[in-house]
Image (cartoon, rainbow, N blue to C red):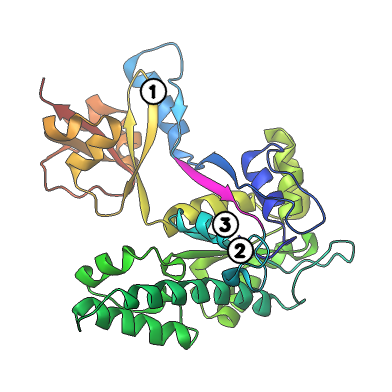
Amino acid sequence: MGLPNVGKSTLFNALLKRQQAFVANFPFATIEPNVGIVPVPDDRLKKLSQVIKESEGIDHLPPEVPATVEFIDIAGLIKGAHKGEGLGNKFLSYIREVDAICHVVRTFTNQDIVKEGSIDPLSDFEVVETELMMADLQTVQNAKLKIKNDSIFKKILDRLEAALEQGKPARKLAFSDQELKEVKALSLLSLKPILIVLNIDEKALQKTKELEQEFSNLFGVPKEQIIAVSAKVEEDLAALDQEDQKLYLKELGIDRSGLERVIQRAYKTLNLITFLTAGKKEVRAWTVKKGSPAPFAASVIHTDFEKKFIKADVVKFDEFIALGGWKDAREKGKVRSEGKNYEIKEGDVIEFKISP
């Protein structure tokens, strides 16, 4: 999301590696949101596939199935959206459905592109943040009208109202676990975690780290929440085959696509981790929230597996690769049998044992 004509749909098209979203040089070129399922780049799958082929003695590489993130391209927001300006409430309703916000901010220069708002990225960022907070303020005040007693929930609402009126988004407030459950029920827009994508000029690609630090300081957000990319370059890259992409990246003086960083950072922003399964049928990356217990992770593979869970055989990815698969990893004592209370770790290679 972001103001009109900052490069949201161009970035979205590059993510999908095809022209799904309509790109045009005028506000509200995107009316209905575009939705795309994007694979998370993961070099571990290729290594797993090779190990399984060799260790299991099969004549082909098993298919690789990556984890995915769903991206939604939403129409450009303008000042006054919370009062119904532009697409107004319809626009805001789309944002309520997502788990995190990827906020695209324009820093590139192009006099031919119509620009809503100022030429100041901080001002543009603040316009969007303000609209989300103003919409949240209405939500909080409406909720307060329905409360007649001086309950704990009312005190939470009072805190939220005071913060929002001072221009402080809900995500910057500290809540207990119980309070957070109450707050989440409000579906506040400014509570959602954010990832800020700086849409930069091609000539600035070699100083992305410096730009990310600069805008981290300017916007007052952690550096991990800011990624500098050129949406136009990414769109050009997406049209090339893999070998030509490598050559183009080399010409640009960068080692990998900015899109890879966007996808992987979006994954982390959502507090997600990956566990892996490896067998003759396929090697696959599965997605769970950080801190998920083993039975829940099993249910991601099949809903019945949570009830039928017995144990999980777990080995670290690096050890699985170094030892050449399940057989040798077991013989070397590197495979651990974990029970229901085991917390899944990033990169665990797992084989679940399920009752009949």
Q: In terms of image quadrants, where is residue 316?
A: top left
Q: Amino acid at mark 2?
A: Gly
In the rendered image, is residue 332 in sight?
A: no
- What's the magenta region? 68-75
Does dot 1 land on a helix, a strand or a loop?
loop
Q: Which mark is residue 90?
A: 3
Q: What residue is drawn where x is 39% and y is 31%?
A: 284
Find the residue positioned furthest to the right: 112
The 10 Å Cα crowd at callout 3, few under 14, some 14 to 19, many 20 or more, is: some
Mark 3 or mark 1, earlier in chain? 3
Disc tally is 3
Q: Is residue 275 magenta?
A: no
Q: Which mark is residue 244?
A: none
Mark 1 or mark 2, earlier in chain? 2
Q: What residue is drawn where x is 30% and y is 73%?
A: 146
Q: Position of residue 45 (x, y in %)?
A: 44, 34
